[in-house]
Image (cartoon, rainbow, N blue to C red):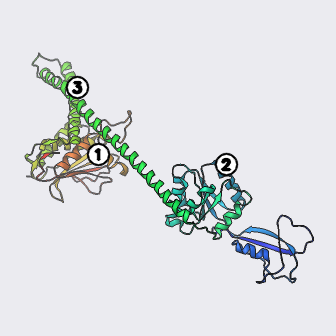
Amino acid sequence: MRGPCIYAEACSAREESVSRRRGYAKGPSRDGNGRGASSRAAWSRGGRFADSRPLARSGVIFWWRCTRVPLAVARVLHIEDDPNSRRLVEKLLSREGHEVVDTESGLDGIRLAREQRPDLVLVDINVPDLDGYEVTLRLRGMPELEGVPIVAITAEGDRQTSLAVGADGFIAKPIDARRFARTVASFLGGHREAADETGEIRLRVQSQRIVERLEDKVRELSDANARLEEMARLRREFLQNVSHELATPMTPVVGYLKLLLDEELGPLTDLQRKCLLSIERSTRRLRGVTDTLLDVSALETGRMHYYSREYDFGEVAARAVELARAAHAQLNVLFPDPPSPLPAVGDPDKLRRSMVHVLDNAAKFTPRGGEIAVEVRRAAEGGYALLVLDSGPGIDPRERERIFEPFYQVDGSVTRQHGGVGLGLAFARRVTMAMGGGLDVECPPQESVAGRKLGGTLVRLRVAERAPTGTS
């Protein structure tokens, strides 16, 4: 049974003509309340007597044999970094029937106090991370510990400060093993101590210490933030430089490949053409990665330019689906004719590339022979939407926002099954947001697309009918 630990002292009166022995209490047979003096002493400590019958004699000194029996078990939280002290407290309190929960960390002690709901907390003032004063302040402010005694285990000079920050009392170090359990019982029974004026002064000093510590933490966070900003700047510069270094040699490669395939440099055999077409596909893929790197770099530096003109949203979507079908012939891409016309103003080239990225992502996670359903609709909030629903395994809810971070891969290992560098969806979301829309993921999908209700992931790409112009 949990609750404050109360001791009963069942005493039998015996007149003894022997000297006082351990385990016996001495006193007259009666006091003014008709109760033995040892009974009264125990009562004042918060104890309770199982037998307090008045005795017949008066004024005669005799011995009472007393047995202390715990009526209830208390849960004690002990926050102490010294393992020897933790073992000693565990031994002394377990012997009395208490349950002891201990930890060496102040922060962990705060967590345990919230979870374990102790009946009493013992705090060593010199615990690491947060010191005992800060731990006491935090514990005293927790609604879960209202009315729970918090006792500081401290040296002589720290006692008043401990009381001033909210402790209900203190136990001196080193711990006196003979008195420790009785002292704990007194706090469980309601004993409390109060701080004097010196303690109030020390409280102000301690508050200043806490403020200084907080200022140190703020400085550390500011320094860490500055380092992160510097790393972000270096990352942007790296992306920009790498993109240009890759793009520059790609130009002659693409040009000469076109000359070779057009047989401007001589006729080709079937084998030569097959090899050149394979090179062209790989080059086109590398060119796409390079272009996306350049675009992401421009987006992050705020130098992405949008070239607005009139276009038809349905026609742009149809062209993107055509490219996806050519790149993923092993899949069945369902795409009913979009409603026409769907006039809009914006950058159709970047929009088409965004759509291709979304379709490529759906194809990447759809098993061979699977279906991808694509449909163009008018968006409920205005503008237009392209819905892409795949038949893949779906996505963990914890990954829904992270997939839009540049370079993030659901499976980032070198042995992953799916290719890509993790830039497509990041690019598509930033472009669509700049064009007055956005990119959202729904898994599991709650609606059908193109007449199909598949169990994979639904991506909804939206743009405004008239997109903002300029840079992003």
Q: Which one is in front in this view, the residue at disc 3 or the one at disc 2?
A: 2
Quarter assignment of residue 279 = top left
Q: Residue at x 51, y 56 (%)?
A: 134
Q: Is residue 453 above or below residue 262?
A: below
- To which residue does mark 1 refer? 404
Quarter assignment of residue 27 = bottom right
20 vs 156, left or right, is right
Q: Earlier in the sequence, mark 1 or mark 2?
A: 2
Q: Tell me where residue 392 appears, x and y as whole percent.
A: 32, 45
CA gap, disc 3 and disc 2: 72 Å
Q: Is residue 146 above or below residue 217?
A: below
Quarter assignment of residue 295 = top left
- Callouts 3 and 2 close, C-beta under 8 Å: no
Q: Earlier in the sequence, mark 1 or mark 3?
A: 3
Q: Tag 3, which secondary structure?
A: helix
Kindly tell me whether residue 371 is visible in this rendering.
Answer: yes
64 vs 288, left or right, is right
Q: Tell me where residue 344 appears, x and y as whole percent.
A: 9, 51
Residue 84: which numbered mark, if any? Answer: 2
Three-letter code for the amino acid on which mark 2 is drawn: Asn
Q: Tag 1, which secondary structure?
A: helix
Q: Which one is in front in this view, the residue at disc 1 or the one at disc 2?
A: 2
Q: Tell me where residue 17 appears, x and y as whole percent.
A: 93, 71
Q: Quadrant of the N terminus?
A: bottom right
Three-letter code for the amino acid on which mark 1 is drawn: Phe
Q: Is residue 118 above or below residue 80?
A: below
Three-letter code for the amino acid on which mark 3 is drawn: Ser
CA gap, disc 1 and disc 3: 31 Å
Residue 278: which numbered mark, if any? Answer: 3
Residue 5: which numbered mark, if any? Answer: none
